[in-house]
Image (cartoon, rainbow, N blue to C red):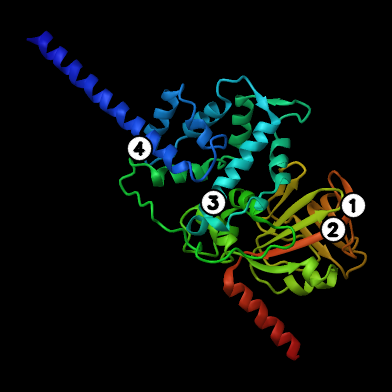
Amino acid sequence: MGNQSSQSETKSHSKESEITSEQKSAIIEQIIQLLSPICTDNQFPLCIFHQRTDKTSHYRIIEILSSIRQSDEFPNILIKLYWNDRASISRDDVTKLFRDCCMFDLKQAMANNINQFQTNMLDNDCFSALTNSIGTITNSEITPEEFSNWMRVQFPTLFYGFEMWLRKNSVLNKTNNTNQEISASNNSIITMNNILNPTWIWLLTYHLPNLYLSADNTCTNLVEKMSSILHGRMWDHLYDSHRDGSSLNRFQHHIFGYKAPIIILFEISDGYLFCLCCDEEFRESPKHFGGIQSCLLQLKPVFKVVLEGPNIIFMNTKLRGVSALGLFIGRDHTHTFLNIDGDFFNVKHINGEGRLAAIDVWGAGGTKSADEQKDIRQWENKQ
């Protein structure tokens, strides 16, 4: 009797496992069908599901999705599938992975009107800068271990958008609503004629402190925040050197009096692009300013966080004898990472020097902060 009972339990367990495998296979097929209109067979993430030889990894993805907790194992499985048993892949293939991830996330951020997405929104300089930040540039190949270690430190949210999409579209998610709308996606894409473009929005959404992504309180996740920026609800365009004139006076006129965090993009003639984030009112000051969420990012040609923390910004255009005139980013005057002269023309930075080609400034304080700045200007004009 005991043996019969054991055999019966074994058969029952085997049948249960078989059903579970069939369910997983059905879910994988459904995922492939849902991904097909979004990306081509050779694009991530669809390409990893066309590798029929690694069912174990595919099934493990489904198992991870059945939990409400995010797993560190998830990105490693995706990396394994993308490398597809190769010891290493070319830097071009890694750059393509970044491009595919950006394209996928932007399409999700424009989900309610996906026709808004255009391939010219993709900036290859961004994807190359990310690849350039991995290991030694002279190495033409990148191993999965090297990429995983880099991603853990530099870009842990790279697959965030895809995981959110899977959780929303997986039948294992009982609260799934495939018709759920992303806030702000009913609006048109904001005009971006200077430095900022959808690709840089994608990168900054995943790398800036949450303070700079908090103006639209209807957003519940990073993809919705990305959508809100794209559709003009999260950030206000304070200054565009192409539109408003390129000079220190115009820069000060458009950003002074804005009492909220700001994001400043500096494009240098030697090919470098920097992003300065200031978490308090930007001003002229006889001493360094900026709070704990201030930072300086180098966006290209190699992406990296240059400096972060309090008191890294110093701007002096009037007080001679205190320091040279201009804008300086660094903890003190002897150790600066980005210097712009008093004429806002010449730039010195950690890797060289050049001419200030363009400035793009965005306010992250929401409509209230922008309206308050306008009120201050109107009051000053009446005086």
Query: Which residue is under mark 3?
Result: 107
- 259 lies above or below 117: below
Mark closest to the chain's N terminus, 1 or 3:
3
Circle 4/circle 3 CB separation < 8 Å: no
- Residue type indicated by callout 3: Lys
Snapshot quadrant of residue 379: bottom right
Depth-wise, is mark 1 or mark 3 nearer the camera? 3
Depth-wise, is mark 4 or mark 3 nearer the camera? 3
- Residue type indicated by callout 4: Ser
Measured as percent of width and height from the top left, residue 340 is found at: 86, 58
Left-right relation of 350 to 35: right
Query: Which residue is under mark 1?
Result: 354
Mark closest to the chain's N terminus, 4 or 1:
4
Mark closest to the chain's N terminus, 3 or 2:
3
Mark closest to the chain's N terminus, 2 or 4:
4
Snapshot quadrant of residue 289: bottom right
Residue at disc 2, secondary structure: strand
Depth-wise, is mark 2 or mark 1 nearer the camera? 2
Mark closest to the chain's N terminus, 4 or 3:
4
Q: Nearer the viewer, residue 39 or 79?
A: 39
Q: CA distance from mark 2 to mark 4?
A: 50 Å
Q: Residue furthest left?
A: 1
- Residue type indicated by callout 1: Gly
Query: Which residue is under mark 2?
Result: 357
